[in-house]
Amino acid sequence: MSPQFHLFSLLPPELRTQIWLSAFSTPPPTFYFYKPGAWKLTPCSCSLDSSALDFVFDHKVYDAVQLDIPLFFVNREARAIARAWMRENDVEEVEDGEREERVVFRKEFNPVKDVLFMPYDQWEKFACEGVNRGFANDALGRYLHSGVSTIMNLALPVELFQSSTGIILELGEVMEQWYQHLQVLYLIIDPPSDLRPVNDGMKIQPRWNLKDSEGGSFIWNYESRSFDYRQGEETLDPALCALIREISMKLGEELTKNNIIEFETRPVFAVKQSALE
């Protein structure tokens, strides 16, 4: 039986609120699974040419992630605190009649804070999505204003680069044309077999977080136009370290070409989470 503090209700309201809030923290960067459909065409608002179209990146296409917030169900006071925290962190509650609590907490993808994860078998779709959308029937013969995604964090399985050395060049081209705001490339070591989207009809995915491998990272040095290796607490496998170094160095050519100031490649693990930390 869990211990209870029976005098909690006698504490001043300000202190109780502070204690409730201490149970929450800012959600760490979370994985969101890639799926096609984010690149869209809309009428161009800055052109007198009625046939002109804007390329728009709609990140709301990606499924939301489910969070567990046990405090929500403690009592009315805790629920009020939980809802205030949810508003600050863009978390919303959705009714679900099949669950005992009858509510699910969901958080939509934030292109600046969160991480877009690319499963191994989705790379080609991701790399070609923008180009293919530009050649769709409704785009033929139209003037297209190129769009750029606001995504800043991308995660790819290391095995993707082990399968083909050409992937590094493809990634550089994709960054140059569509994803110029990328600042961190997370390389997933030994992805779990269940690191896959779940199709349950609710468009809500289980929560996966990043766990640092403690193996260091490669930081882009804008002044020298090269990567510096920042040693971590652990030592990476030599072959893996060499691969990550190669990926970083080849991407450096694109970073230099596009005058990118901040960038890093970081080896991490994917960890499934069931509770909000």
Image (cartoon, rainbow, N blue to C red):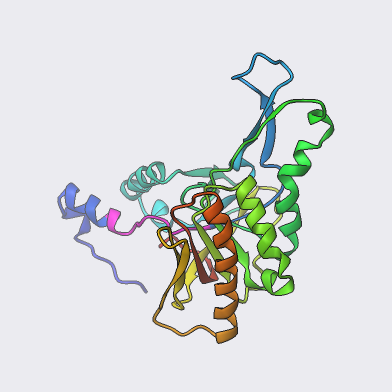
Residue 125 in view, yes or no: yes
Reply yes or no: does residue 112 show up in magenta: no
Residue toward you, 13 or 223: 223
Location of residue 30 with respect to 103 vertically, above or below: below
The image position of residue 251, as x and y in percent, is 58, 62
The image position of residue 168, as x and y in percent, is 66, 64
Residue toward you, 5 or 170: 170
Residue at x 35%, y 51% (from the top left corner): 75
- Furthest residue in direction right, as rendered: 137
Quarter the C terminus occupies: bottom left
Residue 100 in view, yes or no: no
Residue at x 35%, y 72% (from the top left corner): 2
The image position of residue 81, as x and y in percent, is 32, 47
User: Number of labelled discs?
Assistant: 0
Residue at x 18%, y 48% (from the top left corner): 14
Name the dominant secondary structure of the magenta segment: loop
Q: Which of the 4 image quarters holds residue 230?
A: bottom left
Location of residue 266 with respect to 71 vertically, above or below: below
Q: Which residues are magenta?
A: 20-30
The image position of residue 188, as x and y in percent, is 58, 70
